[in-house]
Image (tube, rainbow, N blue to C red):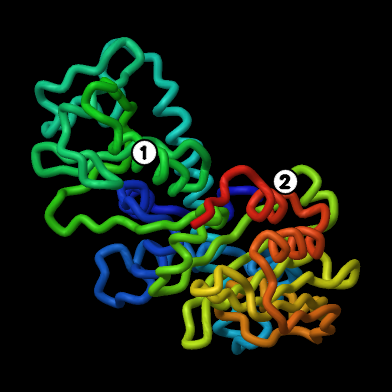
Amino acid sequence: MGIHRAAIDEALLAFVAADPTYPARVIQCIADESTHPLRLALERAVESLSAEVAAEALDDPKRAFLLARMDPSDARRRVSLDIVTEEISCLLHQRRSEALQQADGRRPPLPYGHKALTGVVPDKELLVSISDFSPARPSLQRGGFAFHLPPTLPAPNSSYWLTSRLLRLSSGAGAKVRLDPFIVCPVEGYRSALYAMITYGRPLDWTRLASLKCEEHAEWAPDGLTALVGVSSTQICWSPRDDGIHFTCEELPDDASARPARYAHAIYAPDKRAFVHADGALRYYLPGQLQERLATHVRRAGKAGVQVKIFRTDGVLAREDWCELIAALFVWNQDVQSYFLGCHHLAA
């Protein structure tokens, strides 16, 4: 996507650059607050967009689903804010890249030289010791200010999990980090975002499941063989209920017209160390239905699409037999195979 289609005020750009969350949230907050000091700058950026640019965005099929139920004026406002956000994101990525590669030895690159960093000496690779800061995930705090690692990708949250891991290391690890040139925030009023990975989950552990008090869920993005069979994502959930621990799993296709989703449901009885019910089904979606389904997780999806059940067991099924049955249902899905048949699942 090109940039420089909107007139972006430098004060607006700097404000978004310093925020530790993400540009879309910052822009929306400014848009929603009529008295925000940067509201006029945002409106000037929106008004600077040509009618052709807005019309092109409104006709973009990737946006059509989100805009379909909006009033035309609301849809135009939405895409205009989106375009401004996208252009600010592009500009910030460019400027961050330039700042991180700065080779001017006459002055320290940003944020080094900040008053809160007095006494912190970067090494020749411009890394500073974590021990010089108070860890407050996902930031490093010193002198009343919060500092961050640079994003490893254009996505501003791409270093969130790396920071979390680094801050968990023992002091003996001697960890050092590069500080982001722009994300520097006063600790007073500091607010960060909390993220969860789209791809996440814990190993299968029967002991943990037996004492489950709240839902445990996971979602896996496809790679390798799983990607080759047209999978968009695989979602699972374990939910404790009065009659046992209910399991649901759905493997969602990336093209509704090419193949159905594969779906499984089961009830685990911890006292029997076995399953008392299991079934497998296919779920057929229309393209629009699939897009709606992809916007949520199987634990909240309920009865979606047109479901065609292909097997069911109502007797007692040993855990090992059930694992092999589910793995067979989701053949060629390597995430499911690893979860149910891999070396990491733990027996009670």
Position of 64 with respect to 161 (left or right) is right
Residue 146 visible in image? yes
From what the image shows, is residue 25 above or below residue 124?
A: below
| Relative side of 257 to 346, left or right | right
Q: Nearer the viewer, residue 182 or 348?
A: 348
253 vs 79, nearest the viewer? 253
Real-space CA distance between mark 1 and mark 2, rounded to the nearest whole angstrom: 24 Å
Residue type (three-letter) at the residue carrying disc 2: Asp
State the image coordinates of residue 31 (x, y, percent, origin top left): 38, 72
- The secondary element bearing badge 1 is classed as helix
Taking the image as shown, residue 48 lies to the left or right of residue 175, namely right
Image disc number at residue 223: 2
At horizontal 19% and vertical 26% (from top left) the residue drawn is 113
Instruction: Identify the residue position indicated by label 1 in the image.
Output: 165
Q: Amino acid at mark 1?
A: Arg
Which x, y percent locates residue 17?
36, 47
Q: Tell me the element at label 2.
A: loop
Identified at 29% across, 22% down, the residue is 173
Q: Is residue 201 visible?
A: no
Quarter holding residue 159: top left
Left or right: where 234 falls relative to 260: left
Crowdedness near tag 2: few (<14), some (14–19) or many (≥20) residues, C-alpha within 10 Å: some
Which residue is pictured at 9% across the width and 38% down the height?
A: 143
